[in-house]
Image (cartoon, rainbow, N blue to C red):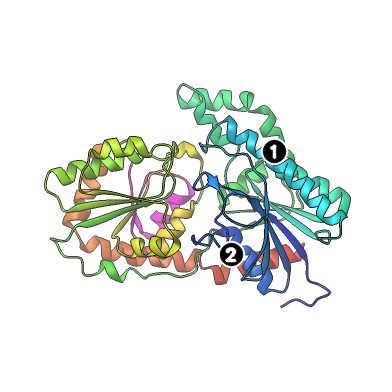
Amino acid sequence: MVSERTAMNVWINNPFDNLPGEGRRPQRYNLLCRALAKAGHRPIWWSSDFSHATKRPRALPPVYDAPEGFQVRLVPTHPYADNIGLRRVWSHRRYAAEWETLAREAVAHGELPPPDLVLTSWPPIETAAAARRMRETWGCRVVLDIMDAWPENFYRLIPGPRPLREALGPLLFAAPLRAARRACREADAVSAVGLTYLDLAARHGCRAPRHLCYHGIMRMNNGATRYALGEDEPLRLIYVGNMGRSYDLPTAVRAVRDLAAQGEPIRLDLAGTGPREPLLRREAAHSPAIHFHGYLSNEDMQQLLADSDLAIIPMFPDSRVAVPYKLADYTAAGLPMLCCLTGETQALIERYGAGSMYRAGDLPGLTRLLRDYLHRRTRLTREALASARLARENFMMDDIYPEFVRFLASL
């Protein structure tokens, strides 16, 4: 616990994570604010009045105190329907401008003291520039917390083969790339959810201190529910998250649908929503083996995870995601994983032996893997224990977030 003299006024800006009071799973910035408050600092979380997850306005007051000891302030935000598109980019631009206006007014009117440190997530892009302007005014430290490779993950929107997209991407996205390089060069520090993004920051010219903090988990199930799965019991496969273009969910739905039609005891639970849900429902073709649950409360999601046997991370490698929330959520439940996301996530799963890899779009390959799990149930036990160990050694919030707070305080 820091003294009053060394306690910091910390502003966190992230418009995407679940907020206190929504009944959803506490994510990165909620856990970071808790750790800051527990250490004696004074965190304020600036977020959006529009839910990125549900794509609906939030039913929360514009300013409120979370029971965990920090304040939440909501910024008016223009809605968008798709995670990848120009409307989201425009919404982020307006969000950053609104945030800066509200923040400066709050300080000018004596409602808030100036911040000592401002941490902005990346994305959105524009909040980093607003934080630098705040530094010019108030002398605060600025930290960039990289959650995603923006704008690089937009390269996949370019038609044509990957080598062409990689060649054209830096030209077509020159302006946001310049913003990314400047944000990394001019931050007082950079943190990230994966080593992949810390390396990206270094390539962008970052010479400031850097810190790795994976997504945190609050509790875990050691996989005991997988131990006694009988041969006649259905193998329960689960997916939790967005149903958007970054995910090869149609292949998973087809594989389970076809196996069930052949008499295999298998079930797929899909928790979440997104623009491709209607397509997935059509692919399911009213199969009794495939169940859509919508966007669940934290309690219901944890129960669904606990009832499952195997989880899927069906992300296309060109999404450039390093370590998704799913990996932490699944390992917290002690679930073996089927994954087509390469890079850092693949390295973690393979290092611990916590699941299997397949190629995105490879229906026969995924079907073979599922058959193997169906007919070698002891494999689930072994990989469930490995998944739980992966969680214990990398994602426990009581270990990684106090370390994150110490890094911020050292600045």
> What residue is rendered at 62% in x and 63% in y?
32
- Compared to 253, does 388 lie above or below? below
Magenta stretch contains residue 358? yes
- Compared to 273, does 93 lie above or below? above
> What residue is rendered at 39% in x and 66% in y?
388
Q: Is residue 271 left or right of residue 407?
A: left
Q: Nearer the viewer, residue 206 or 216?
A: 216
Q: Quadrant of the N terminus?
A: bottom right
Helix, strand or loop status at disc 2: helix
Q: Nearer the viewer, residue 84 or 286?
A: 286
* Quadrant of the image occupied by residue 125: top right
Q: Is residue 131 left or right of residue 288?
A: right
| Residue highlighted by disc 1 | 94
> What residue is rendered at 58% in x and 66% in y?
400
Magenta stretch contains residue 27? no
Mark 1 packing: few (<14 Cα in 10 Å), some, or many (20+)? some
* Quadrant of the image occupied by residue 389: bottom left
Q: Earlier in the sequence, mark 1 or mark 2?
A: 2
Q: Is residue 305 left or right of residue 267?
A: right
Q: Gap between marks 1 and 2, in whole Å?
A: 27 Å
> What residue is rendered at 50% in x and 30% in y?
156
Disc 2 marks which amino acid?
Leu
Residue 131: % across, % down = 77, 48
Q: Nearer the viewer, residue 144 or 385?
A: 144
Residue 73: % across, % down = 69, 56
| Residue highlighted by disc 2 | 31
Disc 1 marks which amino acid?
Arg
- Compared to 360, does 10 lie above or below? below
Residue 122: % across, % down = 64, 46
Helix, strand or loop status at disc 1: helix
* Region in magenta: 336-360
